[in-house]
Image (cartoon, grey):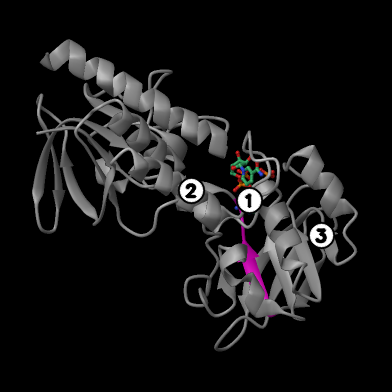
Amino acid sequence: MNDIIIIGGGIAGLTAGMYAKRGGMETLLFEKMFVGGQAATTYSIENYPGFIEPISGPDFAMRMEEHARKFGLEIFYDEVKEVVVDGKIKKVITDNKEYETKTIILAMGASPKMLGLEKEEQFRGRGVSYCATCDGTFYKDKVTAVVGGGDTAVEDAMFLAQYASKVYLIHRRDQLRASKILQDRILAHPKIEILWDTVVESIVGEEEVEGITVKNLKTEERSQLELDGFFIAIGIQPNSELVKGKIQMSDDGFVLAGETMATNVPGVFVVGDLRYKQIWQLVTAASDGAVGTLSAQRYIMENFE
Ligand code: NAP
């Protein structure tokens, strides 16, 4: 019988796993793709305490994984297809096997939101991308645009500007949401042009992205931009499909939990980007992971021993 099964191997899940194994709990972690989650697709991390020199996302994720494995965490690369959360003993079901556990920590994270434009899905991988650090190097000396005004959009634009000849940052308001330090950097960047109060109306191209049409919301003026790459960074949506209808969520699908990470279902905890909250940072994801495991441990002591 497992004490804790963690679903998702991002920063929150890996931290939960490290704490669990270090605390002597029988623990498994399931990850369907690659560990590190969204952090692993980040170009450079400069705001994780203790890392004075910037570290790349993949390196950071590798170190987190190594740290968790050092305490004996077993990571299964398998997709969880179903969870059974009612009853004292929970079940985690993959294609091949069913696992029993006293507690579950949900750490499935979040994925980039789509804009919802026609051709967006069709041209994904053919000029449309949600990950500048994954695809940015394909656009050497090309023209690209990023839509969004948050930290991700600004970081993506600056990453792309290392390769592209020109980067447009398209934002629907006249003020960025991104942190001040990033705003200062982007406003001073010679290769980046910000299109304020502007929305994207359509993607232009036959087989791949050739451009986009945009509209200025203040002047109502429409224009077309010729582009090779179109990057979308307009926020995140929760990967909560697995527990839909089984656990309390916000209207937009983030799982609700308080300070202890306990959901409304006893023995089920939620950590990281999947949890309904206001601040999404690596350091808060790691913090959630630690708190989630310690709360699960306490729950086990109170209910099983
Ligand atoms: P975010 O902070 O939610 O920003 C999303 C941006 O996209 C906003 O500027 C928003 O505009 C715009 N937007 C949303 N829907 C749109 C639509 N349909 N059409 C056009 N624009 C739209 O998302 P994020 O940048 O992905 O960041 C997510 C979280 O991760 C944040 O908490 C962020 O601080 C954190 N993060 C931190 C770092 C770092 O610390 N270095 C790096 C990356 C991300 P409005 O502003 O008008 O709402």
> If the image is split into quadrants, where does the N terminus sit?
top left
Q: Are marks 1 and 2 in contact (CB under 8 Å)?
A: yes
According to the picture, the residue beneath numbered tag 2 turns out to be 63
Name the residue rendered at 70%, 54% in the picture.
155
Helix, strand or loop at mark 2: helix
Amino acid on which the number 2 mark rests in the picture? Arg
Q: Is residue 224 above or below residue 300?
A: below
Counting from the top left corner in percent of width and height, residue 266 is at 21, 21
Q: Is residue 179 visible?
A: yes
Using the numbered discs, state the Cα–Cα distance from disc 1 to disc 2 in whole angstroms: 10 Å
According to the picture, the residue beneath numbered tag 1 turns out to be 55
According to the picture, the residue beneath numbered tag 3 turns out to be 195
Using the numbered discs, state the Cα–Cα distance from disc 3 to disc 2 in whole angstroms: 38 Å
Q: Of the two numbered discs 1 and 3 on the same chain, state the one appearing first in sequence.
A: 1
Q: Is residue 220 above or below residue 228?
A: above
Name the residue rendered at 12%, 13% in the picture.
305
Q: Which mark is residue 144?
A: none
**Does any atom of ligand 1 lie closer than 8 Å to the CB of label 3?**
no
Name the residue rendered at 46%, 44% in the picture.
64
Q: Are marks 1 and 3 in contact (CB under 8 Å)?
A: no
Q: Of the two numbered discs 1 and 2 on the same chain, state the one appearing first in sequence.
A: 1
Identify the magenta region: 228-234
Q: Is residue 89 above or below residue 32?
A: above
Q: Is residue 229 magenta?
A: yes
- The quarter holding residue 215 reads bottom right
Q: Left or right: 24 with respect to 181?
A: left
Q: Is residue 296 magenta?
A: no
- Outermost residue on the bottom side: it is 206
Using the numbered discs, state the Cα–Cα distance from disc 1 to disc 3 in whole angstroms: 30 Å
Counting from the top left corner in percent of width and height, residue 223 is at 79, 72
